[in-house]
């Protein structure tokens, strides 16, 4: 019997228009002068007006808003945000946006709380003390960053993703407001949904670290994604579908934060760092191939998942596992996502490039939790099948 530790320190608040309560929530955790960290699209389209109004009603006549967050945040952005927060005496953060905003907020909170150079804190479990209050409000249903213990920040000089991991990075509260997702375009809806599904399916087979608690969250989140992601993609104003995919993303975030992910994420991180591909879409391309690579070690789990989700009645685990992979491939087609690396702009790598890229994959922390060890030859073979 595996021993395990499960933790989920983030308070989760769900409901239509619940984002308007952000200032009240951050005050519950001791914040009184928050930095509102977001992106220009949300500001320009007035999607955070209710949050700004709440800050003004709370006495902040000039809310401190930092919105220069790129789609793939980097060290320079974090330094700019933390300097702005320090200059204005901010004591907490409200983050509103997708995964890049969430990761920027977590990294900014490191600098705001602990000082020093951000690079001093990269790695796992380097941070060993509580940070300033952080409230996360996701505007996509995919990354799970609103409840996770991890932040990924790009180092553009070294062309790699920096990993920051600690239970103290988890936001104090996550506010899930499906209204904020209504304007999310279909392709981005699909891409972020596949990111969440990848979290589910990798957490379920993660070696050693998974548990009955994380498995239950991942399995139910996967069911919600298969059921509601096509609806959310086809009709962005379907509030029920938006809400269910948002809840699923958060559940998956809690699951993988406790269990880990695996080879699909390691492949996607390395590919995104090298070729600037969208993380969710890159996960989607690699997911069927990563699952097939793992079947030899994880067929019993995949088989149970396939039967639980109604994709197979077969008692043969390998056969049921293939049915689960086929269901993933069918979902990709249904939501209109590409299924090859070529289709997402990844160039065909030559031997020298492949060797450098494989090193990025093998050094990525996500691969540690994969149930099957992958050699350089295995990784190259997956790349070629996905290409």
Image (cartoon, grey):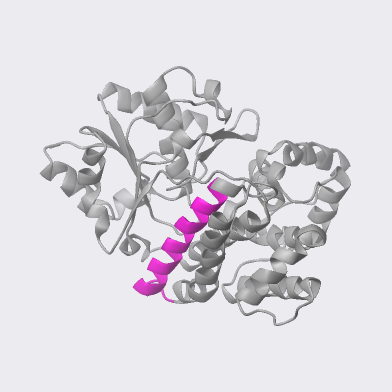
Q: Position of residue 275 (x, y in %)?
A: 67, 45
Position of the C terminus by quadrant: bottom right
Residue found at the far top of this picture: 116
The residue at 43%/36% (across/down) is: 106
Determine whether 196 is above or below 154 in the image. below
Q: Is residue 380 magenta?
A: no
Residue 109 at least partly seen:
yes
Question: Could you tell me what secondary structure mostly forms the magenta stretch?
Answer: helix
Query: Residue 133 sits in which quadrant?
Result: top left
Q: Nearer the viewer, residue 370 or 94?
A: 370
Q: Is residue 282 visible?
A: no
**Which residue lies at the image location 69% right of the left edge and 53% below the top edge?**
264
Query: How far across and how far down the image is residue 226, in percent?
Result: 55, 73
Residue 303 rendering spot, x and y as whole percentages = 72, 70
User: Residue 271 placed where, x, y %?
Assistant: 69, 46
Which residues are drawn in magenta?
Answer: 235-257
Quadrant in the picture for residue 242 = bottom left
């Amino acid at each position: 019997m595996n021993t395990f530790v499960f933790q989920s320190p983030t308070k989760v608040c769900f409901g239509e228009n619940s984002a308007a309560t952000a200032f009240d929530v951050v005050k519950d955790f001791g914040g009184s002068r928050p930095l509102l960290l977001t992106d220009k699209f949300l500001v320009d389209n007035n999607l955070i007006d209710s949050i700004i109004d709440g800050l003004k009603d709370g006495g902040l006549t000039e809310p401190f808003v930092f919105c220069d967050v790129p789609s793939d945040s980097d060290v320079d952005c974090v330094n700019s945000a933390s300097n702005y927060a320090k200059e204005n005496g901010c004591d907490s953060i409200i983050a509103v946006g997708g995964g890049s905003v969430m990761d920027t907020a977590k990294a900014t909170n490191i600098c705001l709380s602990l000082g020093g150079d951000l690079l001093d804190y990269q790695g796992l479990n380097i941070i060993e003390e509580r940070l300033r209050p952080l409230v996360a409000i996701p505007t996509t249903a995919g990354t799970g960053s609103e409840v996770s213990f991890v932040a990924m920040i790009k180092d553009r000089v070294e062309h790699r993703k920096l990993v920051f991991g600690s239970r103290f990075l988890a936001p104090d509260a996550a506010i899930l407001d499906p209204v904020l997702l209504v304007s999310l375009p279909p392709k981005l809806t699909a891409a972020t949904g596949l990111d969440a599904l990848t979290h589910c399916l990798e957490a379920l087979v993660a070696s050693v670290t998974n548990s009955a608690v994380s498995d239950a969250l991942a399995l139910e989140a996967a069911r919600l994604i298969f059921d509601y992601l096509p609806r959310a993609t086809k009709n962005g104003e379907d509030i029920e579908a938006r809400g269910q995919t948002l809840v699923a993303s958060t559940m998956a975030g809690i699951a993988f934060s406790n269990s880990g992910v695996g080879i699909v994420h390691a492949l996607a991180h390395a590919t995104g760092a090298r070729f600037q591909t969208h993380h969710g879409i890159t996960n989607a391309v690699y997911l069927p191939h990563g699952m097939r690579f793992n079947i030899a070690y994880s067929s019993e789990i995949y088989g149970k998942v396939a039967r639980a989700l109604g994709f197979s009645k077969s008692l043969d685990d390998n056969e049921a596992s293939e049915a689960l992979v086929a269901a993933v491939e069918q979902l990709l087609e249904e939501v209109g996502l590409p299924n090859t690396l070529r289709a997402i702009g990844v160039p065909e790598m030559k031997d020298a490039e492949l060797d450098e890229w494989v090193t990025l994959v093998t050094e990525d922390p996500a691969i540690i939790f994969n149930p099957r060890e992958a050699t350089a030859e295995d990784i190259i073979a997956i790349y070629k099948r996905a290409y």
